[in-house]
Image: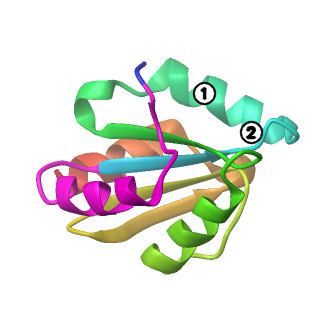
Amino acid sequence: MHWIHLTGEEQLQHIVVKSQEKPQIIFKYSSLCLSSDIVLRKLQEKCCPESADFYFLDLLTYHSLSDKVAGLFHVHHESPQVLLISDGECVYEESHLAINAAELLAQAQLVS
């Protein structure tokens, strides 16, 4: 699986634009959180990069960027967290161990 590292605010507008063409998925990860590692492993096993663009946001390094994501897409910050962006809006969001790779892919298929 190929992750696009989310490291700057300018990428957020790119995600909004690209979400008009195909689903964009943001995964917010913290290396201090065991559930982040569990979810990351499940996503890497189940998700295929062709179905959407997958962005990886390292919360320890880019915490202020996570706040921008929360504001832009009108979601409460969680860790770990996945956001599915389509047509410029967050259309699906889940956090912690409730993140399910199969459900995420099903939701992405609905909006693609």
Residue 77: give x, y in percent of width and height.
Answer: 67, 69
Q: Amino acid at mark 1?
A: Lys
Left or right placement of residue 20 versus residue 64 in this view: left
Q: Is the residue under label 1 in contact with that under label 2 (CB below 8 Å)? A: no
Q: Is residue 74 magenta?
A: no
Q: Residue at x 30, y 55 (%)?
A: 15
Q: Is residue 29 above or below residue 45?
A: below
Q: Residue at x 40, y 48 (%)?
A: 25
Q: Which residues are magenta?
A: 3-23
Q: Element under label 2?
A: helix
Q: Nearer the viewer, residue 56 or 39?
A: 56
Q: Element under label 1?
A: helix
Left or right placement of residue 93 versus residue 63 in this view: left
Front label number (2 vs 1): 2
**Quadrant where the N terminus is found in the figure:** top left
Residue picked out by circle 2: 36
Residue 91: give x, y in percent of width and height.
Answer: 36, 68
Q: Quadrant of residue 94?
A: bottom right
Indicate which disc, 2 or 1, sits on the residue closer to the N terminus: 2
Q: Nearer the viewer, residue 105 or 73?
A: 73
The label shown at residue 42 is 1
Rounded to the nearest angstrom, the CA distance separating label 2 from label 1 is 10 Å
Q: Is residue 112 above or below residue 71?
A: above
Q: Is residue 12 magenta?
A: yes
Exactly how many numbered labels are in the figure? 2
